Image (cartoon, grey):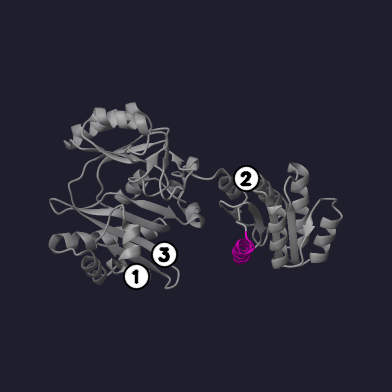
Amino acid sequence: MNIHEHQAKAVLKEFGVAVPRGFAVYSPDEALKAAKDLAKDTGTKVFVVKSQIHAGGRGKGKFEGLGADAKGGVRVVFSPEDVKSNADEMLGRVLVTHQTGPAGKQVNRLYIEEGADIAKELYLSLLVDRVSSRVSVVASTEGGMDIEDVAHNTPEKIHTFTIDPATGVFPTHGRTLAKALGLKGDVAKQGAKLLGQLYAAFNAKDMDMLEINPLIITGDDKLIVLDAKVSFDSNSLFRHPDIFALRDETEEDQKEIEASKYDLSYIALDGEIGCMVNGAGLAMATLDIIKLYGSEPANFLDVGGGATTEKVTAAFKIITSDPKVKGILVNIFGGIMKCDIIAEGVIAAVKEVGLKVPLVVRLEGTNVELGKKIINESGLNVIAANDLADAAAKIVKAVKG
């Protein structure tokens, strides 16, 4: 689960992390009040108006309908009145960045923040390293909007080390970070302290990723988190009702929201062939073979090993609700999951929502003959397949015409 920047900073602040002061707002009038409050409380004469969407690249993003020369999704202004006028222009518009894709995301809230005296921009992130079963720390002296280019063009400027969860953060980790970021003196001490705070937050809140870009050194040698992007392990949210309460469903695909209600692993993609598979590995193989045969998958959908007829029906409805889907491939290997359950679910769903696109079904494993019998006697216009390659070839052919 992802959260907005202002929410991420609030979480980090609980662990003592230094962040600029700011307010989340939902209207131009709230933006004006926030700017006036910041000016009164901090004395700042510089304000930053930040679009709050679940995507990076906001600063270089473009708003639909404002032209190529318009400012991006992060703007620096110098009066409360300018804050209001920019908020009026940004709220309710679609912001397109390199991470949103061409569809973009509508900006429904802004973060009004005090300006910062930036002397140097750095990059710092914490990630789960599944290979070493540790927390991986990634650091670079080249922070800012072009960190992707740095990773591609000058990878030697990206430094990585890991922290063993059995021991936690040691002073040597702080020294390693200081060397990677070129920190010296008191700033190096601040960096070591910050690493401990971030690691504590990462573990305590079951984060998947914590990215700070940029982490800045101010003109008076203070280390401040200027931007933060956080995602959490969705399987751990039952332990964190405070984090779950931060969920913004307007930032999520509605089909993915519906899938979560039935404990289905669903991710929307941009292709034309809907997929229903049991098992993540088999689902990935199904996506790959669809591409191999010349088409694109419309989704990743793993119904799991213990799916019921109800879950399979829900999965089928979610697939058919996508207007991009021109064909459906059901690929089931029955181990824990039984083929007859899948067959019954598919039939129930088709009878309820109808079938307007080609459907190819490949069944193998437990109760496979019963599953095939149920499909064959259903009277549905279903294309049977013998194996995965046969299934991919048939659905691509059916979709292509």
Which residue is disc 1 drawn over?
162
Which residue is disc 2 drawn over?
322
Element type where label 3 sits in the image: strand
Element type where label 2 sits in the image: loop
Horizontal relation, residue 156 to residue 272: left or right: left
Q: Residue drawn at (49%, 43%), measured in percent from left and top?
A: 103
Q: Amino acid at mark 3?
A: Val
Crowding around mark 2 (Cα neighbors within 10 Å: few <14, some 14 to 19, many 20+) is some
Q: Nearer the viewer, residue 138 or 324?
A: 324
Q: Amino acid at mark 1?
A: Thr
- Is the residue under label 1 in contact with that under label 2 (CB below 8 Å)? no
Q: Which mark is residue 128?
A: 3
Q: Amino acid at mark 2?
A: Asp
Crowding around mark 3 (Cα neighbors within 10 Å: few <14, some 14 to 19, many 20+) is some
Label 2, label 1: how many angstroms apart (C-alpha)? 41 Å
The quarter of the displayed image where residue 157 is located: bottom left
Q: Main secondary structure of the magenta part?
A: helix
Disc with the residue nearer the chain's start (2 vs 3) = 3
Q: Is residue 172 visible?
A: yes
Span colored in magenta: 279-294
User: Residue 131, image x and y in percent?
Assistant: 44, 72
Disc with the residue nearer the chain's start (1 vs 3) = 3
Above or below residue 119? Residue 365 is below
Crowding around mark 1 (Cα neighbors within 10 Å: few <14, some 14 to 19, many 20+) is some
User: Residue 212, image x and y in percent?
Assistant: 31, 55
